[in-house]
Image: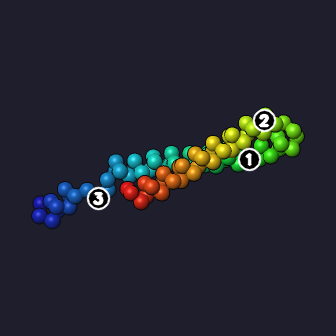
């Protein structure tokens, strides 16, 4: 075996563990962002509909859902930006 072949065989071409960690984190983040954005839209739409039909308690509940989902969405985006900047 030549010296070049020995050097190449000891080298790591792809860090599979880091690649899998990145893939799992991206899937989890995508699910959280999609779910929180969808729940926020649903909450805002439902709150508006409940206000129009004079169902105040349901409107408040839907508004709380919309607000909480919006906060989760914003926090997820902020965390993603933080991780990208600081590694």
Picture coordinates of residue 22, whole percent (x, y): 42, 51
Relative vertical location of residue 40 with respect to residue 6 in this rendering, above or below: above
What is the quadrant of residue 68 in the picture? Answer: top right
In space, the residues marked 3 and 2 are separated at their CA atoms by 56 Å
Picture coordinates of residue 81, whole percent (x, y): 48, 57
Picture coordinates of residue 13, whole percent (x, y): 29, 58
**Where is mark 1, residue-wise?**
44
Inspect this view and state whether residue 30 appears: no
Q: Which dot, 3 or 2, sits closer to the camera?
A: 2
Which of 56/73 is in front? 56
Q: Earlier in the sequence, mark 3 or mark 1?
A: 3
Q: Label 2, secondary structure: give it.
A: helix
What is the quadrant of residue 69 in the picture? Answer: top right
**Where is mark 2, residue-wise?**
58
Q: Which residue corresponds to the image point at 84% horizontal and 36% vertical from the top-left? A: 55
**Where is mark 3, residue-wise?**
13
């Amino acid at each position: 075996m030549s010296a070049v072949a020995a050097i190449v065989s000891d080298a790591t071409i792809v860090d599979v563990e880091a690649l899998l960690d990145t893939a799992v984190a991206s899937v989890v983040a995508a699910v959280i962002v999609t779910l929180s954005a969808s729940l926020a839209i649903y909450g805002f739409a439902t709150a508006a509909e409940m206000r129009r039909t004079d169902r105040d308690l349901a409107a408040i509940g839907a508004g709380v859902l919309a607000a909480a989902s919006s906060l989760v969405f914003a926090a997820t985006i902020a965390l993603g930006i933080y991780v990208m900047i600081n590694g």
